[in-house]
């Protein structure tokens, strides 16, 4: 009995595998409707989770020429700030030392500049030696560089009545990020400013399709792709969008489900037209009085009721069965006949 069952099942499967067409006359009174495949130049499909992140290299780092003993932030990490807004209170003797150092460097610059301007006509008239002029010029430019190093930070510093207190102020509008304690021999990072135009969606796509993606779509907006990274990490590469419009309603660091629009030549067909035969996606294509089984490769979705399949000459502008598909599949594999 077991041998009979095995032989019967094997013959049934072989028959199903070999059968690739169904005569329309054998389908009786089934309601058969057809849709011609429609070409599509763009395929939308889910790619990965996207994250709102600053575009690489866009952060404006706020560096101080000293290390305050205390940095008390006045705004939340990632807050939107306006130009001139106080971002942090700086406390400690180093703050007092900075203001005194700035005053001293400013005074020395004025003295050296006055001396430079007074002696320049003498040098041009050969009234003083070249070595003397070199010393005067060197003292002036050294004083200018020393002052400039401090003055750059002074543009985003506001003093207080207390000499040991000062305030870090925003040099431009954007989103303020706390510092992570980075510092070098000459400066300490107190934070960073990210401009609104620097906010992008970053997502990951297959390296094979990276050159084909043209736009990223969220639940609220669609944004064109600005750049695709060249580095591949485990078969995936990073994709960056253009600046986010307000309609996206996304915040810095927020994650969102995204889909990608890929420039692929595809054909649009009803979702109900696709069935599976021996594990292969397939459709019925009408040719005269016969429905032929044609394997297809589904590459995406168009809306909730249509699929996109890889374009082939065999399918281009051909009538594809769009109704009674399951019933016809049953006839194909020998489950019954239609009256």
Image: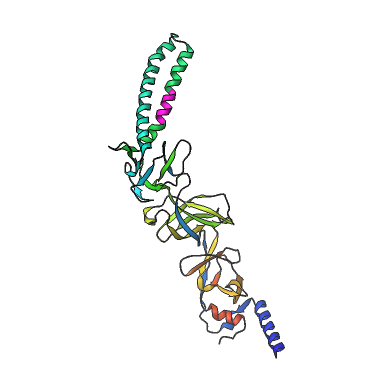
Residue 112 position, x and y percent, is 39, 20
In this rendered view, identify the residue nearer to me: 118 or 249. Answer: 118
Residue beneath the point at 72% across and 88% down: 3
In this rendered view, identify the residue nearer to me: 189 or 90. Answer: 90
- On the question of residue 255 being in view, the answer is yes
Residue 88 falls in image quadrant: top left
How is colour applied across the structure in the image?
rainbow
* Extreme residue in the bottom direction: 1
In this rendered view, identify the residue nearer to me: 127 or 189. Answer: 189
Residue 99 position, x and y percent, is 35, 33
Tally the numbered discs.
Answer: 0
Residue 294 falls in image quadrant: bottom right
Q: Is residue 52 above or below residue 138?
A: below
Q: Is residue 135 above or below residue 191?
A: above
Which quadrant does the C terminus fall into? bottom right
Residue 164 position, x and y percent, is 33, 38
- On the question of residue 321 being in view, the answer is no
Which quadrant does the N terminus fall into? bottom right
Residue range highlighted in magenta: 141-148
Please state if 137 lies on the left or on the right of 9 as rendered.
Answer: left
* Extreme residue in the left direction: 161
What secondary structure is the stretch in magenta mostly built from? helix
Please state if 330 lies on the left or on the right of 219 as rendered.
Answer: right
Determine if the magenta segment contains residue 147: yes
Residue beneath the point at 40% across and 47% down: 178
Residue 251 falls in image quadrant: bottom left
Determine if the magenta segment contains residue 197: no
Residue beneath the point at 44% across and 12% down: 123
Q: Is residue 203 above or below residue 83?
A: below
Residue 127 position, x and y percent, is 43, 8
Q: Is residue 128 above or below residue 27?
A: above
């Amino acid at each position: 009995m077991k041998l009979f069952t095995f032989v019967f099942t094997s013959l049934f499967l072989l028959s199903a595998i070999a059968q690739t067409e169904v005569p329309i006359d054998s389908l009786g009174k089934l309601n058969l409707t057809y849709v011609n495949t429609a070409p599509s130049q763009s395929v939308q499909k889910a790619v990965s989770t996207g994250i709102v992140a600053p575009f690489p290299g866009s952060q404006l780092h706020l560096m101080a020429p000293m290390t305050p003993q205390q940095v008390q932030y006045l705004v939340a990490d990632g807050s939107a700030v306006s130009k001139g807004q106080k971002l942090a209170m700086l406390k400690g003797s180093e703050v007092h030392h900075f203001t005194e150092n700035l005053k001293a460097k400013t005074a020395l610059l004025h003295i050296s500049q006055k001396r430079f301007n007074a002696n320049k006509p003498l040098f041009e008239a050969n009234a003083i030696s070249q070595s003397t002029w070199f010393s005067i010029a060197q003292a002036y430019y050294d004083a200018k560089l020393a002052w400039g190093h401090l003055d750059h930070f002074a543009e985003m510093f506001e003093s207080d009545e207390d000499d040991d207190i000062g305030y870090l102020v925003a040099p431009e509008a954007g989103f303020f990020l706390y510092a992570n304690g980075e510092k070098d021999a000459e400066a300490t990072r107190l934070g960073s400013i990210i401009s609104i135009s620097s906010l992008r969606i970053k997502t990951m796509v297959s390296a094979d399709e990276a050159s084909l993606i043209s736009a990223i779509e969220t639940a609220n907006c669609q944004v064109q792709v600005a750049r695709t990274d060249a580095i591949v990490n485990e078969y995936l590469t990073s994709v960056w969008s253009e600046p986010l419009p307000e309609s996206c309603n996304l915040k810095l660091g927020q994650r969102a489900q995204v889909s990608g629009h890929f420039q692929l030549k595809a054909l649009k067909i009803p979702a109900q037209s696709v069935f599976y035969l021996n594990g292969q996606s397939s459709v019925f294509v009408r040719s005269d009085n016969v429905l032929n089984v044609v394997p297809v490769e589904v590459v995406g979705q168009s809306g909730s009721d249509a699929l996109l399949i890889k374009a082939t000459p065999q399918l281009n502008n051909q009538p594809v069965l769009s109704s009674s598909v399951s019933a016809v599949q049953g006839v194909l594999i020998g489950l019954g006949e239609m009256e």
